Image (tube, helix red, strand yellow):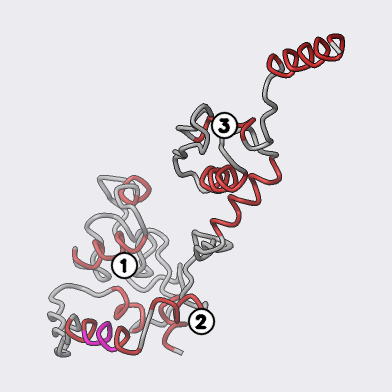
Amino acid sequence: MMRYGFSALVLASLAACSPEVPDSAAGVGFGDYATYQSAREQQLQGAPVSVQPLGAGAPMATVASDLPDLPAAEAQAGIAGTEDAAAPEVIPDNPGLSDEQDFKAVAARETIESDRERLAALRQQYEFIAPTELPERAPSTGPNIVEFALNTSNRVGEPLYRRSGLKMISSQRACARYASPDLAQLAFLEAGGPQRDRKNLDPDGDGFACAWDPAPFRLARH
């Protein structure tokens, strides 16, 4: 009888020394699974976690970092779920081009009222310029090489006017003073040509100075 009593006493002592086995929720710092599930949802949404445990001796989770690491796929799914409520950002194919030809893009930001206001603002910026008469060209007082060319009919090199053989300067040096045959012909006419050749610009006496050719002006008349 005493043997059975001693065995019962030993078993009772061993039971008192064995630790209490926590449940799955208490092992991660929460009193029950519902509290742990609520804290995990707050962690996925990015909100701080502050949960009071049910048990007096259980630890307390104060921040989101106290929660155990979640699988990457589960965390990504939680983040994607929070972004579903926001409208997706529309990224144009080419940001450098205008979207005025895109009906959907224009209709999303413009209305009939906004178009009416924009047209009214543009009308206020219009500037009407009344047409005026063209100014009259001042009459020419000097010789005109075009008019001279149209009033002649002889060929280049065909002499019509007498020239003196005594000249102070050669015709080549005299013509080199002018940038073009047109300027040389104008200076020749201003100095008394074609009857006179004081500058030695028309030594052959055809009336055309420094190889000036009236043919282009004659052709333009036809």
Q: Residue 207 at x, y = what percent?
A: 34, 70
Does label 3 or label 1 sit earlier along the sequence? 3
**Could you tell me how far apart the alpha carbons at marks 2 and 3 are, in whole angstroms?**
57 Å
The residue under label 1 is 162
Q: 59 or 112: which is nearer to us? A: 59
Q: At label 2, which amino acid type do we have? A: Phe
- Residue 29 is labelled as 3
Where disc 2 sits, the SS reads: helix
Taking 75 as reference, is 101 above or below it?
below
Does label 1 or label 2 sit earlier along the sequence? 2
Task: Find out whether the residues at labels 2 and 3 contact each other: C-beta distance under 8 Å.
Answer: no
**Could you tell me how far apart the alpha carbons at marks 1 and 2 are, in whole angstroms?**
82 Å
Q: Residue at x 19, y 67 (%)?
A: 192
Q: Is residue 118 magenta?
A: yes
Q: At label 1, which amino acid type do we have? A: Arg
Q: Residue 193 at x, y = what percent?
A: 24, 68
Quadrant placement of the N terminus: top right
Taking 68 as reference, is 181 above or below it?
below
- Residue 103 is labelled as 2
Q: Residue 196 at x, y = what percent?
A: 23, 66
Does label 2 or label 3 sit earlier along the sequence? 3
Residue span colored magenta = 116-120
- Residue 220 is labelled as none
Q: Is residue 183 magenta?
A: no
Q: Is residue 11 left or right of residue 114?
A: right
